[in-house]
Amino acid sequence: MAEPLVTVVLIEDEKHIRRFLRASLEGEGMRTVEASMGREGLAIVATSRPDVVIVDLGLPDMDGIEVIRGLRDWSTVPVIVLSARTREEDKVAALNAGADDYLTKPFGAAELVARIRAQRRRQSGHVISETAKIAFGEVRVDFDARVVERDGHTIHLTPIEYRLLEALARHAGCVLTHRQLLQEVWGPEHAENAHYLRIYMGHLRHKLEHDPAQPVHIVTEMGVGYRLAGVR
């Protein structure tokens, strides 16, 4: 039998939810690997090299935010948070830690499957049709090699950060609206979630700008969107 195309690591302490998700995902041809604890989940991700990780925030041994931070120390695997926490500050904290998406309980299996597939599509990246290499300021980007350097040093970008940079680069010098960026990077279901953009643009500026507080390349067009300036 052929191996499933997508492997999902599920870090969730509620057994009935794990059972429900396993049935739902395997019904879609996905392979699931389960963990009921955060540390166990981190070890499983390290050995199974999954395509997507699903994390509950309320784990018995450690908070899901710490699990995400632990993953981001060494992995760019897409992370979807599945949590009963509905406050905006919890969502922002998860995104700041490195999550790529956030789904609140109760949830529909069809929506989760759709979000997993969306992350897989975005993980594949987009083709830069105009040029495979750009430079701005101290930054050099080779889109063919998926390498970003600043002052000759390789800079690690998460999948979301990379897709944002890619979107800006395809339209270098032009303003992309908040809605355009949200739809292109996160999908139409997030077209109104402007706080996603603020968080990740802050991450990009911190990594790529000489002075993140006064950016000269990843420029905010007040009330409209963002623009990549000074590309050569």
Image (spheres, helix red, strand yellow):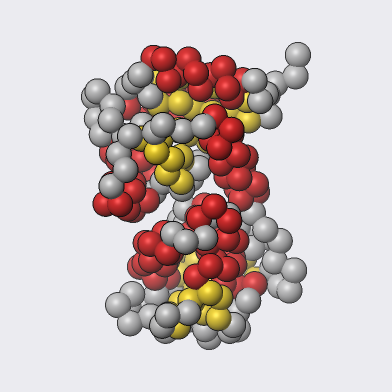
**Front residue of this view, candidates 8 and 153:** 8
Rendering quarter of residue 4: top right
Residue 36 image position (x, y, % from top left): 36, 19
Q: Quadrant of the N terminus?
A: top right
Q: How many marks?
A: 0
**Front residue of this view, candidates 11 and 23:** 23
Q: Is residue 131 above or below residue 6?
A: below
Q: Is residue 60 above or below residue 63?
A: above
Q: Which residue is painted at 26% across and 51% down in the image? A: 89
**Front residue of this view, candidates 45 and 168:** 168
Residue 154 image position (x, y, % from top left): 47, 60
Tell me if 109 is positioned left or right of 90 in this view: right
Residue 168, visible in the rendered structure: yes
Tell me if 157 is positioned left or right of 119 in this view: left
Residue 213 image position (x, y, % from top left): 30, 77
Residue 155, visible in the rendered structure: no
Q: Which residue is painted at 75% across and 19% down in the image? A: 2
Residue 87 image position (x, y, % from top left): 28, 47
Q: Which residue is painted at 53% across and 85% down in the image? A: 230
**Front residue of this view, candidates 12 and 71:** 12
Q: Quadrant of the C terminus?
A: bottom right
Q: Is residue 77 above or below residue 96?
A: above
Tell me if 56 is positioned left or right of 154 in this view: left
Rendering quarter of residue 50: top right
Tell me if 39 is positioned left or right of 139 in this view: left
Q: Which residue is painted at 64% across and 20% down in the image? A: 27
